[in-house]
Image (tube, rainbow, N blue to C red):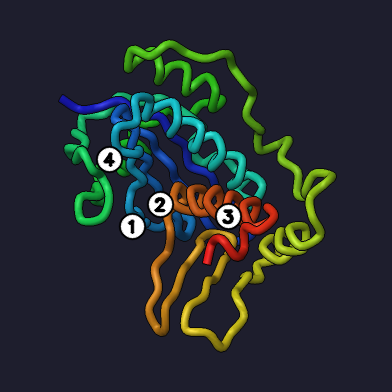
């Protein structure tokens, strides 16, 4: 029966890296990152939240954010421009509670067919999403132009805090960000991954999980600024 997907592949020539992101009609985000010109093992997909009545639009917003973030990191060459593609490959059935042991497995065949079937001509992310929405029977939203590789900027916009600005500079120069040593738990962030570790073991987060963690940490930091919040949270 197959499925319909929308996605793209971007390259970072200076680092010899590539990133592929594909969104399916079930609202599952598949992605892979690795060296240019080599077969890349897909990472764990990011499934929509359970009982989400609008999984595809929410995941499409994440797709837009990933596209912009990758451009900002340095993935400015469109190896496969954004495109909507009909595939012969079937999606894996999505569990009602798609996390933990029920999380969808990686689907290398789906990404491989997308990269082989995607058109090579120019295309914009918003046009590809509009075609994708039409193909799966959703009403399209007004277009908000996504950044293009040729207009991507390498410097952060005004108003970015100094700590964030310094972090962006480090990542752009290929230097990782890491928590302070000496503790059993910590984190490491590179230009291509976010890794949490406990002791000698660790695991990379998917882009969707990173976005969720960022939202949760932002909420926590704002909560801590409230009078009496620190003592109440303990």
Q: Residue at x 48, y 78 (%)?
A: 185
Query: What mark, if any, has residue 220 been given in the picture?
Result: 3
Q: Do the CB atoms of the residues marked 3 and 4 lie less than 8 Å apart? A: no
Q: In the figure, 50 relative to 17: above or below?
A: above
Q: In the figure, 7 relative to 16: above or below?
A: above
Locate residue 229: give its quadrant.
bottom right
Q: Residue at x 71, y 36 (%)?
A: 150
Camera-side residue: 162 or 231? 231
Residue 107 appearing in the image: no
The picture places residue 115, in percent across and down from the top left corner, at: 37, 39
Camera-side residue: 149 or 199? 199
Q: Give the labeled residue for mark 1.
A: 41
Q: CA distance from mark 4 to mark 2?
A: 11 Å
Q: CA distance from mark 3 to mark 2?
A: 30 Å
Q: Residues within 10 Å of mark 3 (few under 14, many from 20)?
A: few
The picture places residue 197, in percent across and down from the top left corner, at: 44, 74
Q: Do the CB atoms of the residues marked 4 and 2 lie less than 8 Å apart? A: no
Q: Residue at x 56, y 61 (%)?
A: 232
Q: Give the labeled residue for mark 4.
A: 110
Q: Do the CB atoms of the residues marked 1 and 2 lie less than 8 Å apart? A: yes
Decide if residue 116 is on the left or right side of residue 34.
left
Could you tell me how many numbered marks the image carries?
Answer: 4
Q: Give the labeled residue for mark 2.
A: 32
Query: What mark, if any, has residue 213 been given in the picture?
Result: none
């Amino acid at each position: 029966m197959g499925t319909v997907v929308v996605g793209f592949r971007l390259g970072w020539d200076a680092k010899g890296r590539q990133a592929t992101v594909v969104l399916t009609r079930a609202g599952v985000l598949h992605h892979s990152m690795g060296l240019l010109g080599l077969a890349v093992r897909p990472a764990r997909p990011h499934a929509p939240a359970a009982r989400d009545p609008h999984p595809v639009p929410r995941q499409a917003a994440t797709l837009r954010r990933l596209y912009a973030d990758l451009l900002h990191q340095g993935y400015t060459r469109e190896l496969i421009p954004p495109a909507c593609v009909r595939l012969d490959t079937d999606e894996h059935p999505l569990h009602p509670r798609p996390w933990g042991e029920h999380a969808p497995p990686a689907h290398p065949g789906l990404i491989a067919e997308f990269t082989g079937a995607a058109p090579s001509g120019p295309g914009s992310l918003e046009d590809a999403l509009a075609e994708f929405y039409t193909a799966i029977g959703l009403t399209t939203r007004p277009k908000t132009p996504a950044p293009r590789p040729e207009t991507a900027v390498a410097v952060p916009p005004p108003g970015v805090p100094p700590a964030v600005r310094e972090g962006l500079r480090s990542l752009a120069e290929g230097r990782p960000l890491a928590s302070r040593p000496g503790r059993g738990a910590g984190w490491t962030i590179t230009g291509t991954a976010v890794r949490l570790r406990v002791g000698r073991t660790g695991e990379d987060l998917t882009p969707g999980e990173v976005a969720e963690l960022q939202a949760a940490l932002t909420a926590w930091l704002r909560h801590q600024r409230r009078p009496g919040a620190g003592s109440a949270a303990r």
